[in-house]
Amino acid sequence: MIRAAATLLASLLAVAITACGPAPVPYAPYTDVTFYWQFRDGDMNVYGNFTALSPGCDIANVDHVRVTLNSPIGSQTMTVPCIAINGMPGATFTNVPTGPYTWTLEGRRLGFTVFVMEGGGDVFDFPFFYPRLEAVYPNMDLYYVLPTGLDCFSVSEILFELDNIVGGVIEYSSDNVYVACRPPPNNGFTMPSIPVGDYGYRYVAAVNSLGQSIAQECRFGLPPQVPIVQVAPSGTAATSFLSYATVACP
């Protein structure tokens, strides 16, 4: 009897000590969540390495990313610059309710979604996520030929603007991406994720190191039935022949 009473007393003390011990610390109800992103086109080329040294936004020609977060208590959508003020390709969202999430990330160019990614994860304790956004459309390669007597020793950059003839909107522009002059056979560049359709370019220009146009061609204003470029589902290559010009393109 004495031994049984002692065993019972020891058990009760163990329970009491456990009950009085430190309680588990619950997750905070809100936290910050950070996304760093990169992009992959239809040819499996990857743009960006999640750092400020190679953000990838310029090559993918993505100016903003729209982020939709879906939690058990609701959804919220935010559109942020592709590159943050610290140069990183991403964004931090503050005071986000903790818990399991699904999300949709849309890489946007001039208001159009051209890369997208869906995923999910647990949002606790200031997490970081590294999503890769996939191209929605095929690539288009634009090749250019410099006029006779002009070469890439005197041309430092190619400027251009590709317009959707039917919609009358700019689809891709060198405003956000650097296109170096390259001699044949590499005298071209890739425009990733271009919606299928008919296009024309307002201008293609070769500029020198001072930013002065030394050769250009203007093709804006042609009727819709005469597209300069037709982008097929598999992607097509267009050739633009630069010519000497003394007046600026409209």
Image (spheres, rainbow, N blue to C red):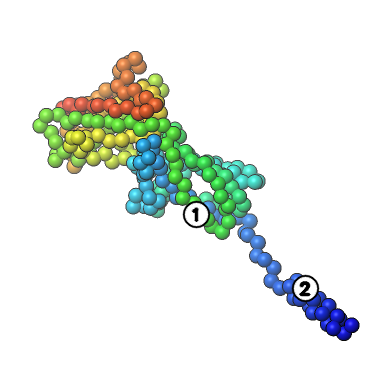
**Residue beneath the point at 52% across and 41% down:** 118
Q: Residue furthest left?
A: 149
- The residue shown at (82%, 80%) is 7
- Residue 15, numbered circle: 2
At label 1, which amino acid type do we have? Phe
Nearer to me, 22 or 169: 22
Judge whether residue 125 can be spotted in this image.
yes
Is residue 68 shown left or right of residue 111? right
Element at label 1: strand
Image quarter (top left, top right, bottom left or bottom right) of the N terminus = bottom right
Please state if 247 lies on the left or on the right of 21 as rendered: left
Secondary structure state at the residue bearing disc 2: helix
Neighbourhood count class around disc 2 (C-alpha, 10 Å): few under 14, some 14–19, many 20 upward: few
Is there CB contact under 8 Å for labels 1 and 2? no
Name the residue nearer the viewer: 49 or 226.
Answer: 49
Q: Residues within 10 Å of mark 1 (few under 14, many from 20)?
A: some
Residue at 33% across / 34% down in the picture? 191
Residue 155 found in image quarter:
top left
Q: Position of residue 194 (x, y in %)?
A: 38, 31
Task: Give residue 218's position: percent from left, percent from top.
Answer: 25, 24
In this view of the protein, which residue sits in the foreground, 133 or 156?
133
Residue named by callout 1: 128
